[in-house]
Image (tube, helix red, strand yellow):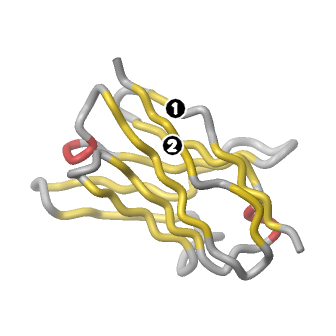
Amino acid sequence: QVQLVESGGGLVQPGGSLRLSCAASGFTISSNAMSWYRQAPGKERELVAHITSVRGSTNYTNYADSVKGRFTISRDNAKNTVYLQMNSLKPEDAAVYYCNSPRFNAWGQGTLVTVSS
């Protein structure tokens, strides 16, 4: 059974950092693309970051323009976990963040990020 479990959300002040984790089970992330999305109240879910794997060991990443230079997506294949490092957080980054496997159309339950002073 494919399952994604996010963690790491919380309350952070503007300019602060958080690292989100997405633990996968039921499949191997090393050979699959993975994504992070977010959804703020009253807004549509949007793609934040995406990581894909070509030829096994090379990771290609892309980001929404709004987070480029501040967020980094990465994976730890040994832990079967995907991360989203978020730096220089802004109030507009506040949302529920979701992990996604495009191949299996699987979603986690989401983790809430609040950015406020």
Name the residue: 36% across, 56% down: 51
Q: Is residue 4 left or right of residue 24?
A: right
The answer to whether marks 1 and 2 mark residues whose Cβ atoms lie closer than 8 Å is yes
Q: Give SS at disc 2.
A: strand
Q: In this view, does 108 lie to the left or right of 96?
A: left
The residue carrying pointer 2 sits among few (fewer than 14), some (14 to 19) or many (20 or more) residues within 10 Å by Cα, namely many
Quarter of the rendering occupied by the C terminus: bottom right
Q: In this view, does 14 lie to the left or right of 32?
A: right
Q: How many marks?
A: 2
**Residue hosting label 2:** 99
Three-letter amino acid code at disc 2? Cys
Quarter of image, res 12: bottom right
Quarter of image, res 104: top left
Relative depth, front residue between 88 and 117: 117
Which x, y percent locates residue 7? 56, 47
**Residue hosting label 1:** 107
Name the residue: 65% across, 70% down: 66
Relative depth, front residue between 18 and 70: 18
* 98 versus 47 height, above or below: above
Three-letter amino acid code at disc 1? Trp
Quarter of image, res 31: top left
The residue carrying pointer 1 sits among few (fewer than 14), some (14 to 19) or many (20 or more) residues within 10 Å by Cα, namely some
Quarter of the rendering occupied by the N terminus: top left
Q: Is residue 16 left or right of residue 105?
A: right
Q: Give SS at disc 1.
A: strand
* 12 versus 76 height, above or below: below
Relative depth, front residue between 2 and 52: 2
Which of marks 2 and 1 precedes in the sequence? Answer: 2
Which x, y percent locates residue 41? 85, 44
Which x, y percent locates residue 58? 18, 64
Distance CA(mark 1)–CA(mark 2): 6 Å
